[in-house]
Image (spheres, coloured by chain):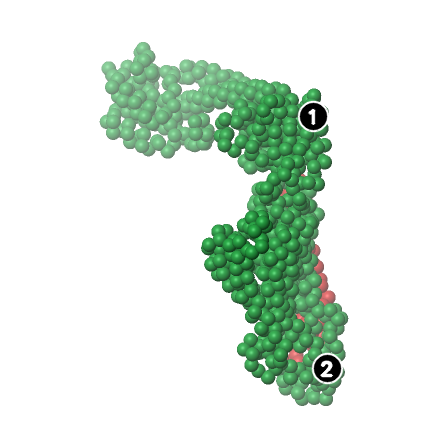
Chain colours: A green, B red
C-alpha cells in the first residue's frame, strides 16, 4: 500500500511493422501500460485493421454455436490453468478454416438427424394408427356382421386418397390419421355440422406421448377413423382434416394388407433407429473432439481481437514502416516495458527492434495504486467515493484499520464477531476453490470479494466485544467482578430480604476494589442503570474518536497542499480549519479526559457537566468561564471568516493581477484552475462563499453525526436486539423443567441461531457497515480527498471480459 | 436399499454449521450453568417459593442451576447426532454428484 498514487509518464512506442503484433501480445500478457487512442476522429469502420477484427468476430460466432451445441450434449469443456498465448497472424487463417469446417460438419449432421427423427415419428404414428384402427374395425364388424367382407373393393379414389367400397350404390370411404388431443372435440363438432351426419368418427387416445418435432413439446395424440358416404363428403372431410393439422395415413383395405404394412413398418423403424443411434454417436464424437480444444480457441480469439483493437488505436508514421503508439506507463515500469518490447521484437523476427521514447505531457495522467488481494477490497471501497486525483494522498492504507475499527465500535459483540470472523476465515481458506467455481450469484460474489474486509471487521468486533464485555448479550466474568455486594450490606439482612433492588455505593469501603482489568465489569450486565452508565461512556468515546479521525483528515490535507505547491491553501484553508476544530472540539476532548481523571468516586457529585460548560463558553457567561475559554472561542470565531472569505478573496486578487506577481500569475492561475473548487472567476466568489459557509457549520453537524451514529443508533439497537433475542427465544428453551421438555431446547437453539444470523449478523452488520462507510466518506475523506481522477486501466488480457463466460457457456 | 438422501447439498451444509455452533455454544452454556454463573440467573426457572422456603439456602437454586446445565448438555448431545446425520448427507450428496457427471 502506498502513500500516494504512482508517478506516470507518457511514452511513445515505435513498433516495427513486422513485429508489432508480437510486441503488443507481450504487453498484453504483462499488463503494464494503458494505450491512448491516436485516431479519435476515425470511425470504427474506417480503421486499418477492421477486416481482421471482422474475421475474429466471425470466429467468435462459430465458437458460440459450437459451445451451445456442446452444452446441449452435456459435455464438459476442460479448462486449463495457464492461459495460452496469442497465436501469430499466420495461424489465424488456420484456426479460421478449422472452425468453419467444424461448423459445416456440425450443421450437416444436425440437419440429417432432424430428418431422420421426423421420419421415425411418421412411421411410429402410422404403426399406432394401424393397430388402433384394427380394433375399431373388428369391434364394428362384431356388431355389423360379415357385411364388410361381402363387397369387393373398388378402385382407389385418388381424390379422397383412401379405399372406397361400394355398398348400396354409395361409396364408403375411410380417412384415418392422428390429431392432437386438445383439438378432438372441436374436430368432431365441425365434422358433424359440415357433413350433416354422413360421417362416422371413431377415435381412441394413444398411450404414448409423442414429441411434436416442430414445436418440440410432448403432447397426447388421438387416432381417429372417419367413415363416410359419397365423394363430396370425402372432399369436405379432407379439407377439414387439413385445417386441423392432422397427420393422415392411408387406410389398408383388409387385414392381410394391414399385417403386411405393419411388418414393413416395423423393420423400417428398426433400421431408422439404428441409423439414428449411429448419427447421434458420431455427433457426440465430433463434439467431444471439439470440446478438447474449445477453451484454447476461445482464449486465442479473445486475445487476437484485443490485439487488433489496440493496433487500431495506433497511428502510422510518415515512412509507413512502423506504428506509433502512445501509452501511459508508470515510471517504475519503464525497464519492464523495454524488456517486453525487446522480447516481442525477437519473436517477430524484426530487423530493427522496437523502442520506447518518453515524452513530456501536460495532460493529467491516470491514477495507479498497486494493490494485492488483501488491500484491493479496501481500495475499492475508497474508490467507490471517487478515484483519487493524480498523485493525491490516498486514504486507503488508513482505511484498512479505521474502517473495521469503526464498524467494531458499532457492532461490538464477542459472539457475533466470532461467527463473522469464522465465516470470513472459511472464505479466505477456500479462496482457490471458490475462484475456480466462478459463481454467477451476484450477492455471493460481492461477499466473497470482501472476504478480507469481513475478516478484519470480525476480528475487531471480537476485540470490542471483549471491551464492552458483551457475548450474545451476556457478560463474561473472566477476572472476577470488582464490586462486592457482601461488603455493602454486611450487617443488614433485613434490607437484603425486603428490597428487590439494591444500590451499591462505591464510597462504602470494600464495595469497589478497583477497576476491572480489561473491559467493562460483568456486574453491569445485571445492573438496572446499565444503560445510563454505558450511554455516557459511549457518547464521550465517540466524540473522542470522531474528533481524532477528523483532525487526522485535516492533517493529511497538508500533504496534498504541499505536493501541489499551493502554499496559500495552507494558510487559508488548513490553518483556520485546524484552529476551529481544535479550539472547540479539541478542548471538548480535553475536558472529557480531564473530568475522567480529576474526579473520583468521592467528589463525583461536584463534577461539573461538560455540556453546560460548553454552552456557557459559547454564550460567554457563567461562573466557570475564565480567560482561557474566552480566548479559545474568540480564536475559533475569528477563523470562520478566514475560512469563508480567505480563499475566494485571494483568488480574486490574483485574477485581478496581484501586485508584483505578474510573471507568475499565469502559471499560478493555471494551477488554481486545475483545482476542483475553481471554475470561472465571476461566479467563483459567490459560489465559494456559500460553499465555505456550509463548510464551517458542517463541523458541528459532523461531530453530532458521529455521536449519534456511533452511540445512539447502534449501541442501543444492536445490543438491545441481541438481548431481546436471548430473552424471547433462548430463555423459553432454558426455563423448561420437565424431563421431556429438554428436547425442546435443541430446536429453540436452532431458531436462535438462524435469527441471530439473519437479523443480527446480516441486517445489523450491513447497516453498521454502511454507516462506517458513510462516516469515512463524508467526515474523513471530505477533509482532504478530491476523488476526481481517472483510474489507470492497463491493457491486460486477464482483465478482458469473456463474452462466453457472461453467457454461462464456459 | 432406497436412497438415504433426503436433503440437498446446501441444506446439509447448513445442518453441519448449525450443529457445530450448537455443540460448542450449548456445551459452554452447560459449563457456565453448572459453575453457577450469576449472569445467567434470569434463565434459571426458580420461583419465590424456592427462595423463601429453602431449608438449606441456596441449595435449591443450585439444584435448579445443575438441572438446566444438564439440559444444555443433553441438547448438545442431540446436536452431535444432528451433525453426524448432516455429515452423512454431505458425503452422500458428494457421491451422487460424482456418479452423475
Q: Chain of mark 1?
A: A
Q: Nearer the viewer, residue A638 or A215?
A: A638
Q: Residue placed at 62% from the left, 80% from the top? A: A626
Where residue A55 sits, quadrant-wise, is: top right
Q: Is residue A513 above or below residue A288?
A: below
Give neighbour class at mark 1: few <14, some 14-19, many 20+ (Cα, 10 Å): some
Task: Give residue A752's position: percent from left, percent from top.
Answer: 60, 61
- Is residue A137 visible in the rendered structure shown here? no
Q: Position of residue B34 (x, y in %)?
A: 73, 69
Q: Is residue A132 left or right of residue A692?
A: left
Q: Residue furthest front?
A: A660
In this orientation, which residue lies closer to the viewer: A134 or A789?
A789
Q: Is residue A564 in view from this perspective? A: yes
Q: Which residue is mark 2?
A: A511
- Residue A717 % position (x, y): 57, 66
| Badge number at residue A353 | 1
Q: Along the line of sight, which residue is nearer the eye, A516 or A268?
A: A516
Query: Left or right of A537: which side holds A177?
Result: left
Mark 2 packing: few (<14 Cα in 10 Å), some, or many (20+)? Answer: some
In this view, the mark in front (1 or 2): 1
Amino acid at each position: 500500500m502506498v502513500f500516494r498514487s504512482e508517478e506516470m509518464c507518457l511514452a511513445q512506442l515505435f513498433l516495427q511493422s513486422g513485429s508489432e503484433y508480437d510486441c503488443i501480445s507481450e504487453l498484453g500478457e504483462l499488463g503494464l501500460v494503458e494505450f491512448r487512442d491516436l485516431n479519435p476522429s476515425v470511425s470504427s469502420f474506417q480503421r486499418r485493421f477492421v477486416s481482421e477484427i471482422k474475421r475474429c468476430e466471425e470466429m467468435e460466432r462459430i465458437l458460440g454455436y459450437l459451445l451451445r451445441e456442446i452444452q446441449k450434449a452435456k459435455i464438459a469443456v476442460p479448462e486449463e490453468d495457464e492461459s495460452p498465448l496469442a497465436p501469430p497472424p499466420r495461424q489465424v487463417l488456420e484456426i479460421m478454416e478449422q472452425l468453419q469446417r467444424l461448423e459445416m460438419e456440425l450443421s450437416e449432421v444436425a440437419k440429417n438427424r432432424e430428418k431422420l427423427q421426423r421420419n421415425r415419428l411418421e412411421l411410429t404414428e402410422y404403426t399406432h394408427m394401424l393397430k388402433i384402427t384394427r380394433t375399431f374395425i373388428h369391434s364394428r364388424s362384431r356388431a355389423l356382421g360379415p357385411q364388410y367382407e361381402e363387397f369387393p373393393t373398388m378402385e382407389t379414389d385418388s381424390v379422397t386418397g383412401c379405399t372406397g367400397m361400394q355398398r348400396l350404390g354409395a361409396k364408403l370411404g375411410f380417412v384415418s390419421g392422428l390429431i392432437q388431443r386438445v383439438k378432438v372435440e372441436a374436430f368432431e363438432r365441425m365434422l358433424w355440422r359440415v357433413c350433416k351426419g354422413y360421417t362416422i368418427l371413431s377415435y381412441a387416445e394413444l398411450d404414448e406421448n409423442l414429441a411434436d418435432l416442430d414445436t418440440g413439446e410432448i403432447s397426447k395424440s388421438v387416432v381417429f377413423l372417419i367413415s363416410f358416404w359419397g365423394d363430396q363428403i370425402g372432399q369436405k372431410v379432407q379439407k377439414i382434416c387439413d385445417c386441423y393439422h392432422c397427420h393422415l395415413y392411408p387406410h389398408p383395405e383388409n387385414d392381410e394388407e394391414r399385417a403386411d404394412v405393419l411388418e414393413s413398418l416395423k423393420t423400417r423403424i428398426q433400421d431408422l433407429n439404428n441409423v439414428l443411434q449411429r448419427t447421434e454417436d458420431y455427433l457426440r464424437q465430433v463434439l467431444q473432439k471439439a470440446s478438447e480444444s474449445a477453451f484454447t480457441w476461445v482464449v486465442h480469439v479473445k486475445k487476437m481481437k484485443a490485439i487488433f483493437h489496440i493496433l487500431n488505436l495506433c497511428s502510422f508514421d510518415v515512412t509507413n514502416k512502423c506504428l506509433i503508439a502512445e501509452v501511459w506507463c508508470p515510471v517504475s515500469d519503464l525497464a519492464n516495458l523495454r524488456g517486453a518490447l525487446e522480447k516481442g521484437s525477437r519473436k517477430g523476427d524484426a530487423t530493427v527492434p522496437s523502442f520506447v521514447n518518453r515524452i513530456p505531457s501536460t495532460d493529467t495522467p491516470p491514477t495507479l495504486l498497486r494493490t494485492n488481494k488483501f488491500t484491493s477490497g479496501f481500495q475499492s471501497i475508497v474508490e467507490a467515493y471517487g478515484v483519487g486525483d493524480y498523485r493525491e494522498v490516498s486514504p486507503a492504507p488508513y482505511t484498512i484499520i479505521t474502517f473495521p475499527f469503526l464498524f467494531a465500535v458499532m457492532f461490538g459483540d464477542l459472539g457475533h464477531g466470532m461467527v463473522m470472523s469464522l465465516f470470513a476465515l472459511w472464505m479466505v481458506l477456500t479462496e482457490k476453490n471458490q475462484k475456480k467455481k466462478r459463481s454467477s450469484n451476484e450477492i455471493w460474489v460481492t461477499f466473497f470479494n470482501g472476504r478480507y474486509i469481513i475478516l478484519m471487521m470480525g476480528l475487531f468486533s471480537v476485540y470490542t466485544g471483549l471491551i464492552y464485555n458483551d457475548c450474545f448479550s451476556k457478560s463474561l466474568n473472566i477476572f472476577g467482578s470488582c464490586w462486592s455486594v457482601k461488603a455493602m450490606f454486611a450487617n443488614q439482612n433485613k434490607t437484603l430480604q425486603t428490597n428487590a433492588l439494591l444500590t451499591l455505593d462505591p464510597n462504602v469501603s470494600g464495595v469497589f476494589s478497583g477497576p476491572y482489568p480489561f473491559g467493562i465489569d460483568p456486574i453491569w450486565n445485571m445492573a438496572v442503570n446499565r444503560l445510563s452508565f454505558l450511554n455516557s461512556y459511549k457518547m464521550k468515546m465517540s466524540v473522542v474518536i470522531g474528533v481524532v479521525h477528523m483532525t487526522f483528515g485535516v492533517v493529511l490535507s497538508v500533504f496534498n497542499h504541499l505536493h501541489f505547491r499551493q502554499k496559500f491553501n495552507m494558510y487559508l484553508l488548513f490553518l483556520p480549519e485546524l484552529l476551529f476544530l481544535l479550539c472547540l472540539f479539541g478542548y471538548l476532548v480535553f475536558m472529557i479526559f480531564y473530568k475522567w481523571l480529576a474526579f473520583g468516586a468521592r467528589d463525583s457529585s461536584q463534577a461539573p457537566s461538560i455540556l453546560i460548560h460548553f454552552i456557557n463558553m459559547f454564550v460567554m457567561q457563567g461562573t466557570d468561564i475564565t480567560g482561557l475559554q474566552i480566548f479559545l472561542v474568540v480564536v475559533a470565531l475569528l477563523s470562520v471568516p478566514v475560512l469563508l472569505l480567505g480563499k475566494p478573496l485571494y483568488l480574486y486578487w490574483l485574477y485581478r493581477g496581484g501586485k508584483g506577481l505578474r510573471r507568475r500569475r499565469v502559471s499560478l492561475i493555471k494551477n488554481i484552475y486545475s483545482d476542483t473548487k475553481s471554475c470561472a472567476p465571476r461566479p467563483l466568489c459567490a459560489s465559494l462563499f456559500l460553499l465555505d459557509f456550509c463548510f464551517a457549520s458542517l463541523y458541528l453537524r459532523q461531530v453530532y453525526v458521529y455521536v449519534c451514529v456511533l452511540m445512539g443508533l447502534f449501541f442501543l439497537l444492536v445490543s438491545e436486539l441481541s438481548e431481546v433475542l436471548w430473552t424471547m427465544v433462548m430463555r423459553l428453551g432454558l426455563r423448561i423443567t420437565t424431563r421431556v421438555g429438554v428436547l425442546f431446547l435443541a430446536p429453540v437453539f436452532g431458531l436462535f441461531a438462524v435469527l441471530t444470523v439473519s437479523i443480527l449478523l446480516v441486517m445489523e452488520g450491513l447497516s453498521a457497515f454502511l454507516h462506517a462507510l458513510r462516516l469515512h466518506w463524508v467526515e474523513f475523506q471530505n477533509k482532504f480527498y478530491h476523488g476526481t481522477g481517472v483510474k489507470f486501466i492497463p491493457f491486460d488480457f486477464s482483465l478482458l471480459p469473456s463474452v462466453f463466460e457472461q453467457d454461462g457457456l464456459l | 436399499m432406497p436412497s438415504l438422501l433426503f436433503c440437498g447439498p446446501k441444506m446439509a451444509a447448513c445442518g453441519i454449521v448449525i450443529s457445530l455452533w450448537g455443540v460448542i455454544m450449548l456445551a459452554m452454556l452447560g459449563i457456565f450453568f453448572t459453575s453457577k454463573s450469576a449472569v445467567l440467573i434470569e434463565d434459571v426457572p426458580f420461583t419465590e417459593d424456592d427462595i423463601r422456603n429453602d431449608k438449606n439456602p441456596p441449595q435449591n437454586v443450585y439444584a435448579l442451576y445443575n438441572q438446566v446445565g444438564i439440559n444444555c448438555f443433553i441438547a448438545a448431545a442431540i446436536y452431535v447426532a444432528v451433525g453426524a446425520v448432516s455429515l452423512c448427507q454431505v458425503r452422500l450428496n458428494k457421491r451422487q454428484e460424482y456418479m452423475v457427471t
